[in-house]
Amino acid sequence: MFNPQNPRQFQAGISMVELVVTIVILAIALLGVSQAIQWGTRRNAETMIEVKAIGLELSSKHLKQAVNYASREGIKWVVLTNGMKWEIHRVSLEDKVQNEKIFTIDFTDLNPKHKEQQELLFLLCKRGVQKDLIGDYYEYKQSVNRHPIGALLL
């Protein structure tokens, strides 16, 4: 589980093998499919996965397409992937539609012994999604980001 008080401490309660298998199975199931898939029921989906064909370079056009769809549906998280590279974005639904890239996972550069990469992968696995750990991670990143802190001080 993500711990905002100690971001280096991470207790997933899941083995690295199980974590990687979960993500890889999801990726394999989605490869080659260029469509939006939502996590949750259609009425209360919070995350949308926009899947592009493997090998296709992810572009700002793909991101814009996914963010526009997510904003119309009231979805606050967008995962844009080509199977090898996963970009996670937070969609702001206030006033003007905006998005912020939270993190990127590139399976070609993945090091299974790297603790921070394990933590980011866990945010996307079934247990992480069920516990809304990505929301906790986002709130933590916002709390230590110099821009919101600077705005509060000014």
Image (cartoon, rainbow, N blue to C red):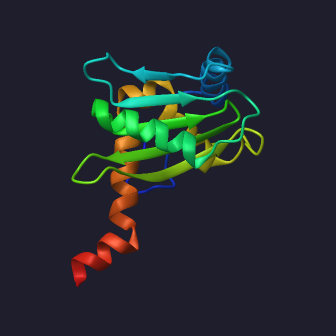
Q: Is residue 61 left or right of residue 83?
A: left
- Residue drawn at (54%, 27%), measured in percent from left and top? 14
Q: Is residue 47 visible?
A: yes
Closer-to-camera residue (97/2) = 97
Q: Is residue 11 visible?
A: no
- Residue drawn at (33%, 63%), measured in percent from left and top? 143
Q: Quadrant of residue 24?
A: top right
Q: Is residue 125 left or right of residue 113?
A: left
Answer above or below: position of 111 versus 142.
Answer: above
Answer above or below: position of 73 versus 116.
Answer: above
- Residue drawn at (22%, 53%), measured in percent from left and top? 95
The spot of residue 129 in percent (x, y) is: 41, 29
Q: Quadrant of residue 150?
A: bottom left
- Residue drawn at (56%, 39%), measured in percent from left and top? 62
Answer above or below: position of 39 versus 139.
Answer: above
The spot of residue 59 in percent (x, y) is: 62, 45
**Quadrant (top left/top right/bottom left/bottom right) for the N terminus:** top left
**Quadrant (top left/top right/bottom left/bottom right) for the C terminus:** bottom left
Farthest bottom residue in view: 154
The spot of residue 51 in percent (x, y) is: 58, 27
